[in-house]
Image: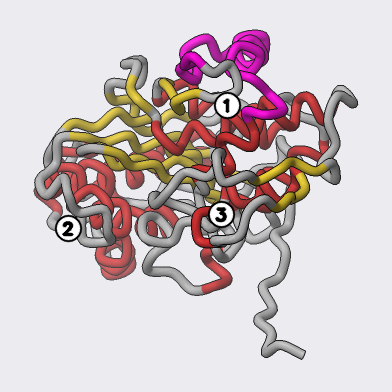
Amino acid sequence: MGSTLNRRTALGIGTVATAGVVLGAAGPAMAAPSTGGGAVEDSRYRGNQVAAIYRREKERAGGTWYTYLSVASGTGPTPTPAVRENADTVVEAYSVNKIAVATAVLDKVDRGLLSLDQRVDVTSAIVVPGGDGIFSLDGAYPSSVTLGHALAALLTVSDDTAVRLCGLVCPAAELNQILVAKGFPKTQVEPVANPNRFFLGTSTARETHDLLQALVRGTLLSATSTTFLLNQLRAPIAFTDGIRRTMSSAERARIATKAGWFGNARHEAGLIFDPAGAPVLTYVLFADGQADPDNFGATHPAVQARAAMGPGFLAAVDGLRNTSVPARKATTYRPTNGG
């Protein structure tokens, strides 16, 4: 009984009564599965823990959530759903859709139509003033960067100008066609008058979840492009205010994540990997309607909720393994001091 209470406390699930409401029966529902139950029971048990943590923090934050959470299954590559809430509602995905933009560009790389070392021009006309990213801070144009550099900026610091740079090599109409062909008809950018520019458009929690799953299963892109994309999302400079906020550097390296925000929406989607580099939890957390819509920092209610979910999710899948998909060990973080 003591170990059960300690584990519940570590996961932040709260009282037995609360756990009973969320998971079913109070007390026994929190007990670890028997070894005779096998991997399926273990997956469901961990999924129940994930669901409890999610629901508690969601209720604290308020607003509306569009969510798909799953944990690795012991029966094959298809994960076990833990939460599906408004999962098929089409929402403005904002910068989470930068994963989809990168997917389309890398698809063209895989087909030999583009290369990561080709250069794109950064002109004053293409720079988005203010907002997120680094290109608007340069103050010296024109310049040029490789396509690989633009994608790295797109996926780590969520650079807005990098969206336009991607549009130079993959116009909106083509980008949407690529996503439809890959099975994501609701994950679409929004074209504008200039064919090389677009708003980041829409998705659903389910489609974003399935895109992330296809990525780690190796069915979305080539092995090289898959590694490139995941390396950006797992980089130390990728988003740290949400799921990864209260974690060590080693724990952060186990998280591939992308956030998006605009208006009163605060989104984040990604994957948690086991220490060997295999994905064990997939999360899509779209949220809007919370208080303090003008606060784009770490103290926004939805961002604080995700920051609380992160360590709980990590603890819930601790010890879970996934041998049905390729393991991809994260690059070791080694800070330098110049020189």
Q: Give, as a three-letter code, the residue at label 2.
A: Gly
Q: Give, as a three-letter code, the residue at label 3.
A: Phe
Tell me: residue 193, above or below residue 230: above
Q: Which SS class for mark 2?
A: loop
Residue assigned mark 1: 211
Mark 1 and mark 2: span between their CA atoms? 33 Å
Q: Which SS class for mark 3?
A: helix
Q: Position of residue 42 (x, y in %)?
A: 48, 42
Mark 3 and mark 1: span between their CA atoms? 28 Å
The total number of labels drawn is 3
Residue 135: numbered disc: 3
Position of residue 304 in the picture relative to residue 182 (left or right) = left
Residue 229 figure quarter: top right
Mark closest to the chain's N terminus, 3 or 1: 3
Q: Position of residue 144 (x, y in %)?
A: 73, 50
313 vs 42, nearest the viewer: 313
Residue assigned mark 2: 14
**Magenta residues, start to end:** 167-193
Asked if labels 2 and 3 touch by Cβ distance under 8 angstroms, the answer is no
Can residue 227 be seen in the rendering of this structure?
no
Position of residue 153 in the picture relative to residue 69 (left or right) = right
Tell me: residue 317, above or below residue 200: below
Q: Is residue 190 magenta?
A: yes
Kindly identify the residue that appears in the image at 64 percent across and 33 percent down.
166
Q: What crowding class fits label 3: few (fewer than 14 Cα within 10 Å), some (14-19), or many (20 or more)?
A: many
Can residue 247 be seen in the rendering of this structure?
yes
81 vs 36, nearest the viewer: 81
